[in-house]
Image (spheres, grey):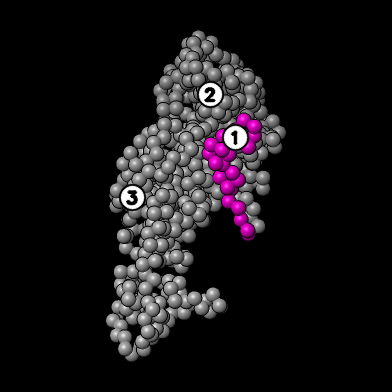
Amino acid sequence: MAAKRMLAVLTICLVFGLGAVAGCAPQAPTPDATADAGAEASGEESQSGKDREYTEDELAVIAGAEGTTHGDIGEDVFLGKDYIDQLYDRWDMVAEEYSPEVRTLPDGRMVQRTPTEYGLASGAWQTQANTNSYNTYWLDSDNRGCGSCHADLGSVLKNMAFEHTQVWNDDIKSNLTVQECINCHHWAPGYMEKNMEFGTLMHAVHFGARHKVQFAEEYGGNCNSCHNATDNGQGMEMWDLVKYDHLWGVNNIASEDLGDVDFSFEQETTQDNAFSFEWMHAYYDQMRHGAGVLGTNLPQSLFDNWEITIDGLVKAPYTATLKELVDEAEKAGVVVEKTSKIVCSWNMVGGGGISNVKITGIPVSWLVEKAGGITDGANGVRAMRADGSSRRSFSLDKLNANEALLVYKINGEPLGAKQGYPCTNWVEGVDAQVFSKQINAYTVADDCPPDFGDSKYCAENYDGSPNGWFDENGVIVNRPNATILDVPEGLVIESGKPFDFHGYVDAYNEHISQMEFSFDGGETWTAFDLADTDPNRVVWWHLQWTPPEQGAYRLTVRATTAEGSEGKQTHTVLVNAKDVLPSKEDTVVLETTSLVPPRAAAAGGQN
């Protein structure tokens, strides 16, 4: 039988304190009273305490002294010990039966979404037991939250019957969370209307005619599958957003106790492709997207014959083919090759709407100089897309700083169809809404929005660059954005061995100055200063940390900028450290991460 925890005063009351039923408060009995009660329970004549000699250990047990264990208790002292032992054995069996599910993902990694209760919180009832399976038996946490049925929300969206905008990013291995879904489907002016709000959609999807039977009968789904019901006036909260406040067994480590951690960052890593959400606002968006999905190679003639016009408030407007401009710019030595980022205003904390790539392009300032320069009164430049679906603008500051480029290569290769072959507008320090694909004109204008940094996306004509996502109160929620990558919820790692958490932090046109990490749910933070970060490139960070013992741990990240912006949302992931990793045969092996099979019976060894 497994070693048992300290016998608390509560157990004494269970055996001897029947008077509590009559209203007596539980109290530790005196040695004499205990001896008399023991004699009566055994049918023997009660003896005076003077006739019974107690060892120091027995007296300590009777007094409920700290550190005493079940093994210290003699059955002649507490005749109910055998019953209590059987009770705890039964609880251990329940704990094994309801042990948290360990899954092996298709990529071979293992996850355990629910913490194992290696020890109960101090002061919790039944603290003398090994466990009462609070997380799984009482809260049923293995069967709650999006991850109970969908191991990867990005995979769910990939396999929808109706194609969803590509918000996942396999190149950086982002893990989509329900918070990202709520952010966009709760407040998305210009993208979605009220009938697309998250609550309306999810209740219809899970309880509608198509899926209700499968959700309710095959998966045992109900309101508690997604929600946490409260008695504090907060109503039906989303379980995934509040679960860390309710689960037992999460080890909290204060910053002063964290020990050695190794932090580093860099801005050179690039991705194979620039992300593209491929918004399907217009027919030509769909055409570009479809050509990319089909792997269509667009003809060289499109590049050679593509025309670019420079007009508006310039002295000598002109039109030239892209090939002519590239040839002339290369001969003049003005072509720019550099590592640069693209990030969308939508990109929420935890999101994948960001990339670092090597771009090759012509400065728009050089193109304007060829037109004789700007005339008086201009305040910006509009990037005109050939299909007419976009007329976003950027400031003259971007033009003069050579941060606006006509890009025709990414990572040394011609653009793909999704990226806007044969060319795209690229402006550093602004969100991707200004990165107009298949651009065919730059129009210098005097009516561009005066505030190019913070004007709301849904301003008239969709002008300006918001550099962040505003909530309904006008607060930017994702600047800065500190995100953890490639850690599926509950990832199983080895205790005592270093683990590399990594991700990115970005703030659009602002300089990241500090990153902070918390292993106790945000109570305390470990801060690292970042110096001389380039806002035009993604900051990739690494934090190497060693879990000191087995158990569940959560990491929360946030950041601040030199300009004073602080993250309004944080990103948290849970990992489960184990002394010995489970064997694959003792786990539930998943062949898909989209809609996983209903939970199988717990396999042996899942602890």
Q: Secondary structure at mark 3?
A: strand
Query: Closest to the observer: 125 or 93?
Result: 93
Q: Which mark is residue 424?
A: 2
Check disc 3 and give the amino acid type. Lys
Mark 3 or 2: the one toward you:
3
Q: Residue at x 42, y 65 (%)?
A: 127
Residue underneath mark 1: 213
- Residue 302 at x, y percent in the picture: 52, 12
Q: Nearer the viewer, residue 201 or 136?
A: 136
Q: Quadrant of residue 65?
A: bottom left
Question: Which three-letter amino acid code belongs to the residue tagged 2?
Answer: Thr
Q: Magenta span has 216?
A: yes
> Mark 1 falls on what kind of element?
helix
Q: Badge 3: how crowded within 10 Å, few (<14), some, or many (20+)?
A: some
Mark 1 belongs to which amino acid? Val
- Front residue of this view, candidates 86 and 506: 86
- Asked where in the image residue 76 lies, by quadrant, the reply is bottom left
Q: Residue at x 29, y 85 (%)?
A: 53
Residue located beneath label 3 in the image? 578
Q: Secondary structure at mark 2?
A: strand
The first of marks 2 and 1 along the sequence is: 1
**In the rendered structure, which segment of residues is drawn in magenta?**
207-232
Residue density around tag 2, few if under 14, some if 14–19, many if 20 or more, within 10 Å: many
Spatial distance from mark 2 to mark 1, Cα to Cα?
47 Å
- Mark 3 → mark 2, Cα distance in angstroms: 49 Å
